[in-house]
Image (cartoon, rainbow, N blue to C red):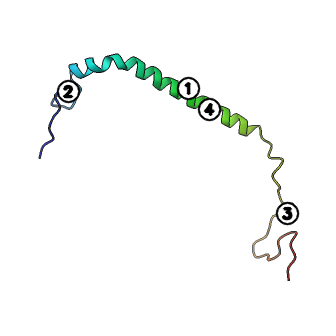
Amino acid sequence: MALNRNSYYNRNWAQSESLIRARRPYLFKNTVLGLGLLVFTGAIYTYTLKAVGQDEFEDVKVPDTPIQIGQSVIRGSKSS
């Protein structure tokens, strides 16, 4: 069963002149919108990385000594 070919594509499935001509008015606007979205997304990404990079994480509690594997007593708790 063969696929029905749309009249806007030639036998090699390339766009025909009429399809290119019909899409031409939207090409510039779509390109500008795409670039605008790319810049906006890049700006948010850059801002986020800079904001997180400035954080010193002073409020995060880090234990003095690492807990060893097999140790049943965790620092600060009592064993029974």
Which residue type carries mark 1?
Val
Q: Residue 3, located in which quarter of the rendered image?
A: top left
Residue, disc 1: 39
Q: Residue at x 24, y 22 (%)?
A: 19
Residue, disc 2: 8
Q: Residue 14, located in which quarter of the rendered image?
A: top left
Up the image or down, 68 lies above or below 16; here it is below
Task: Give the side of residue 53 with respect to residue 18, left or right.
Answer: right
Q: Determine whether label 4 and label 3 are within 8 Å by CB.
A: no
Residues under labels 4 and 2: Cα distance?
Answer: 39 Å
Which residue type carries mark 3?
Thr
Q: Secondary structure at mark 1?
A: helix
Q: Residue 12, located in which quarter of the rendered image?
A: top left
Task: Give the side of residue 65 with respect to residue 28, left or right.
Answer: right
Residues under labels 3 and 2: Cα distance?
Answer: 70 Å
Residue, disc 3: 65
Residue, disc 4: 44
| Residue count near mark 4 (Cα–Cα under 10 Å), binned few <14, some 14–19, many ≥20 | few
Give x and y (percent) for residue 33: 46, 23
Q: Secondary structure at mark 4?
A: helix
Up the image or down, 34 lies above or below 5; here it is above
Q: Secondary structure at mark 2?
A: loop
Up the image or down, 1 lies above or below 50; here it is below
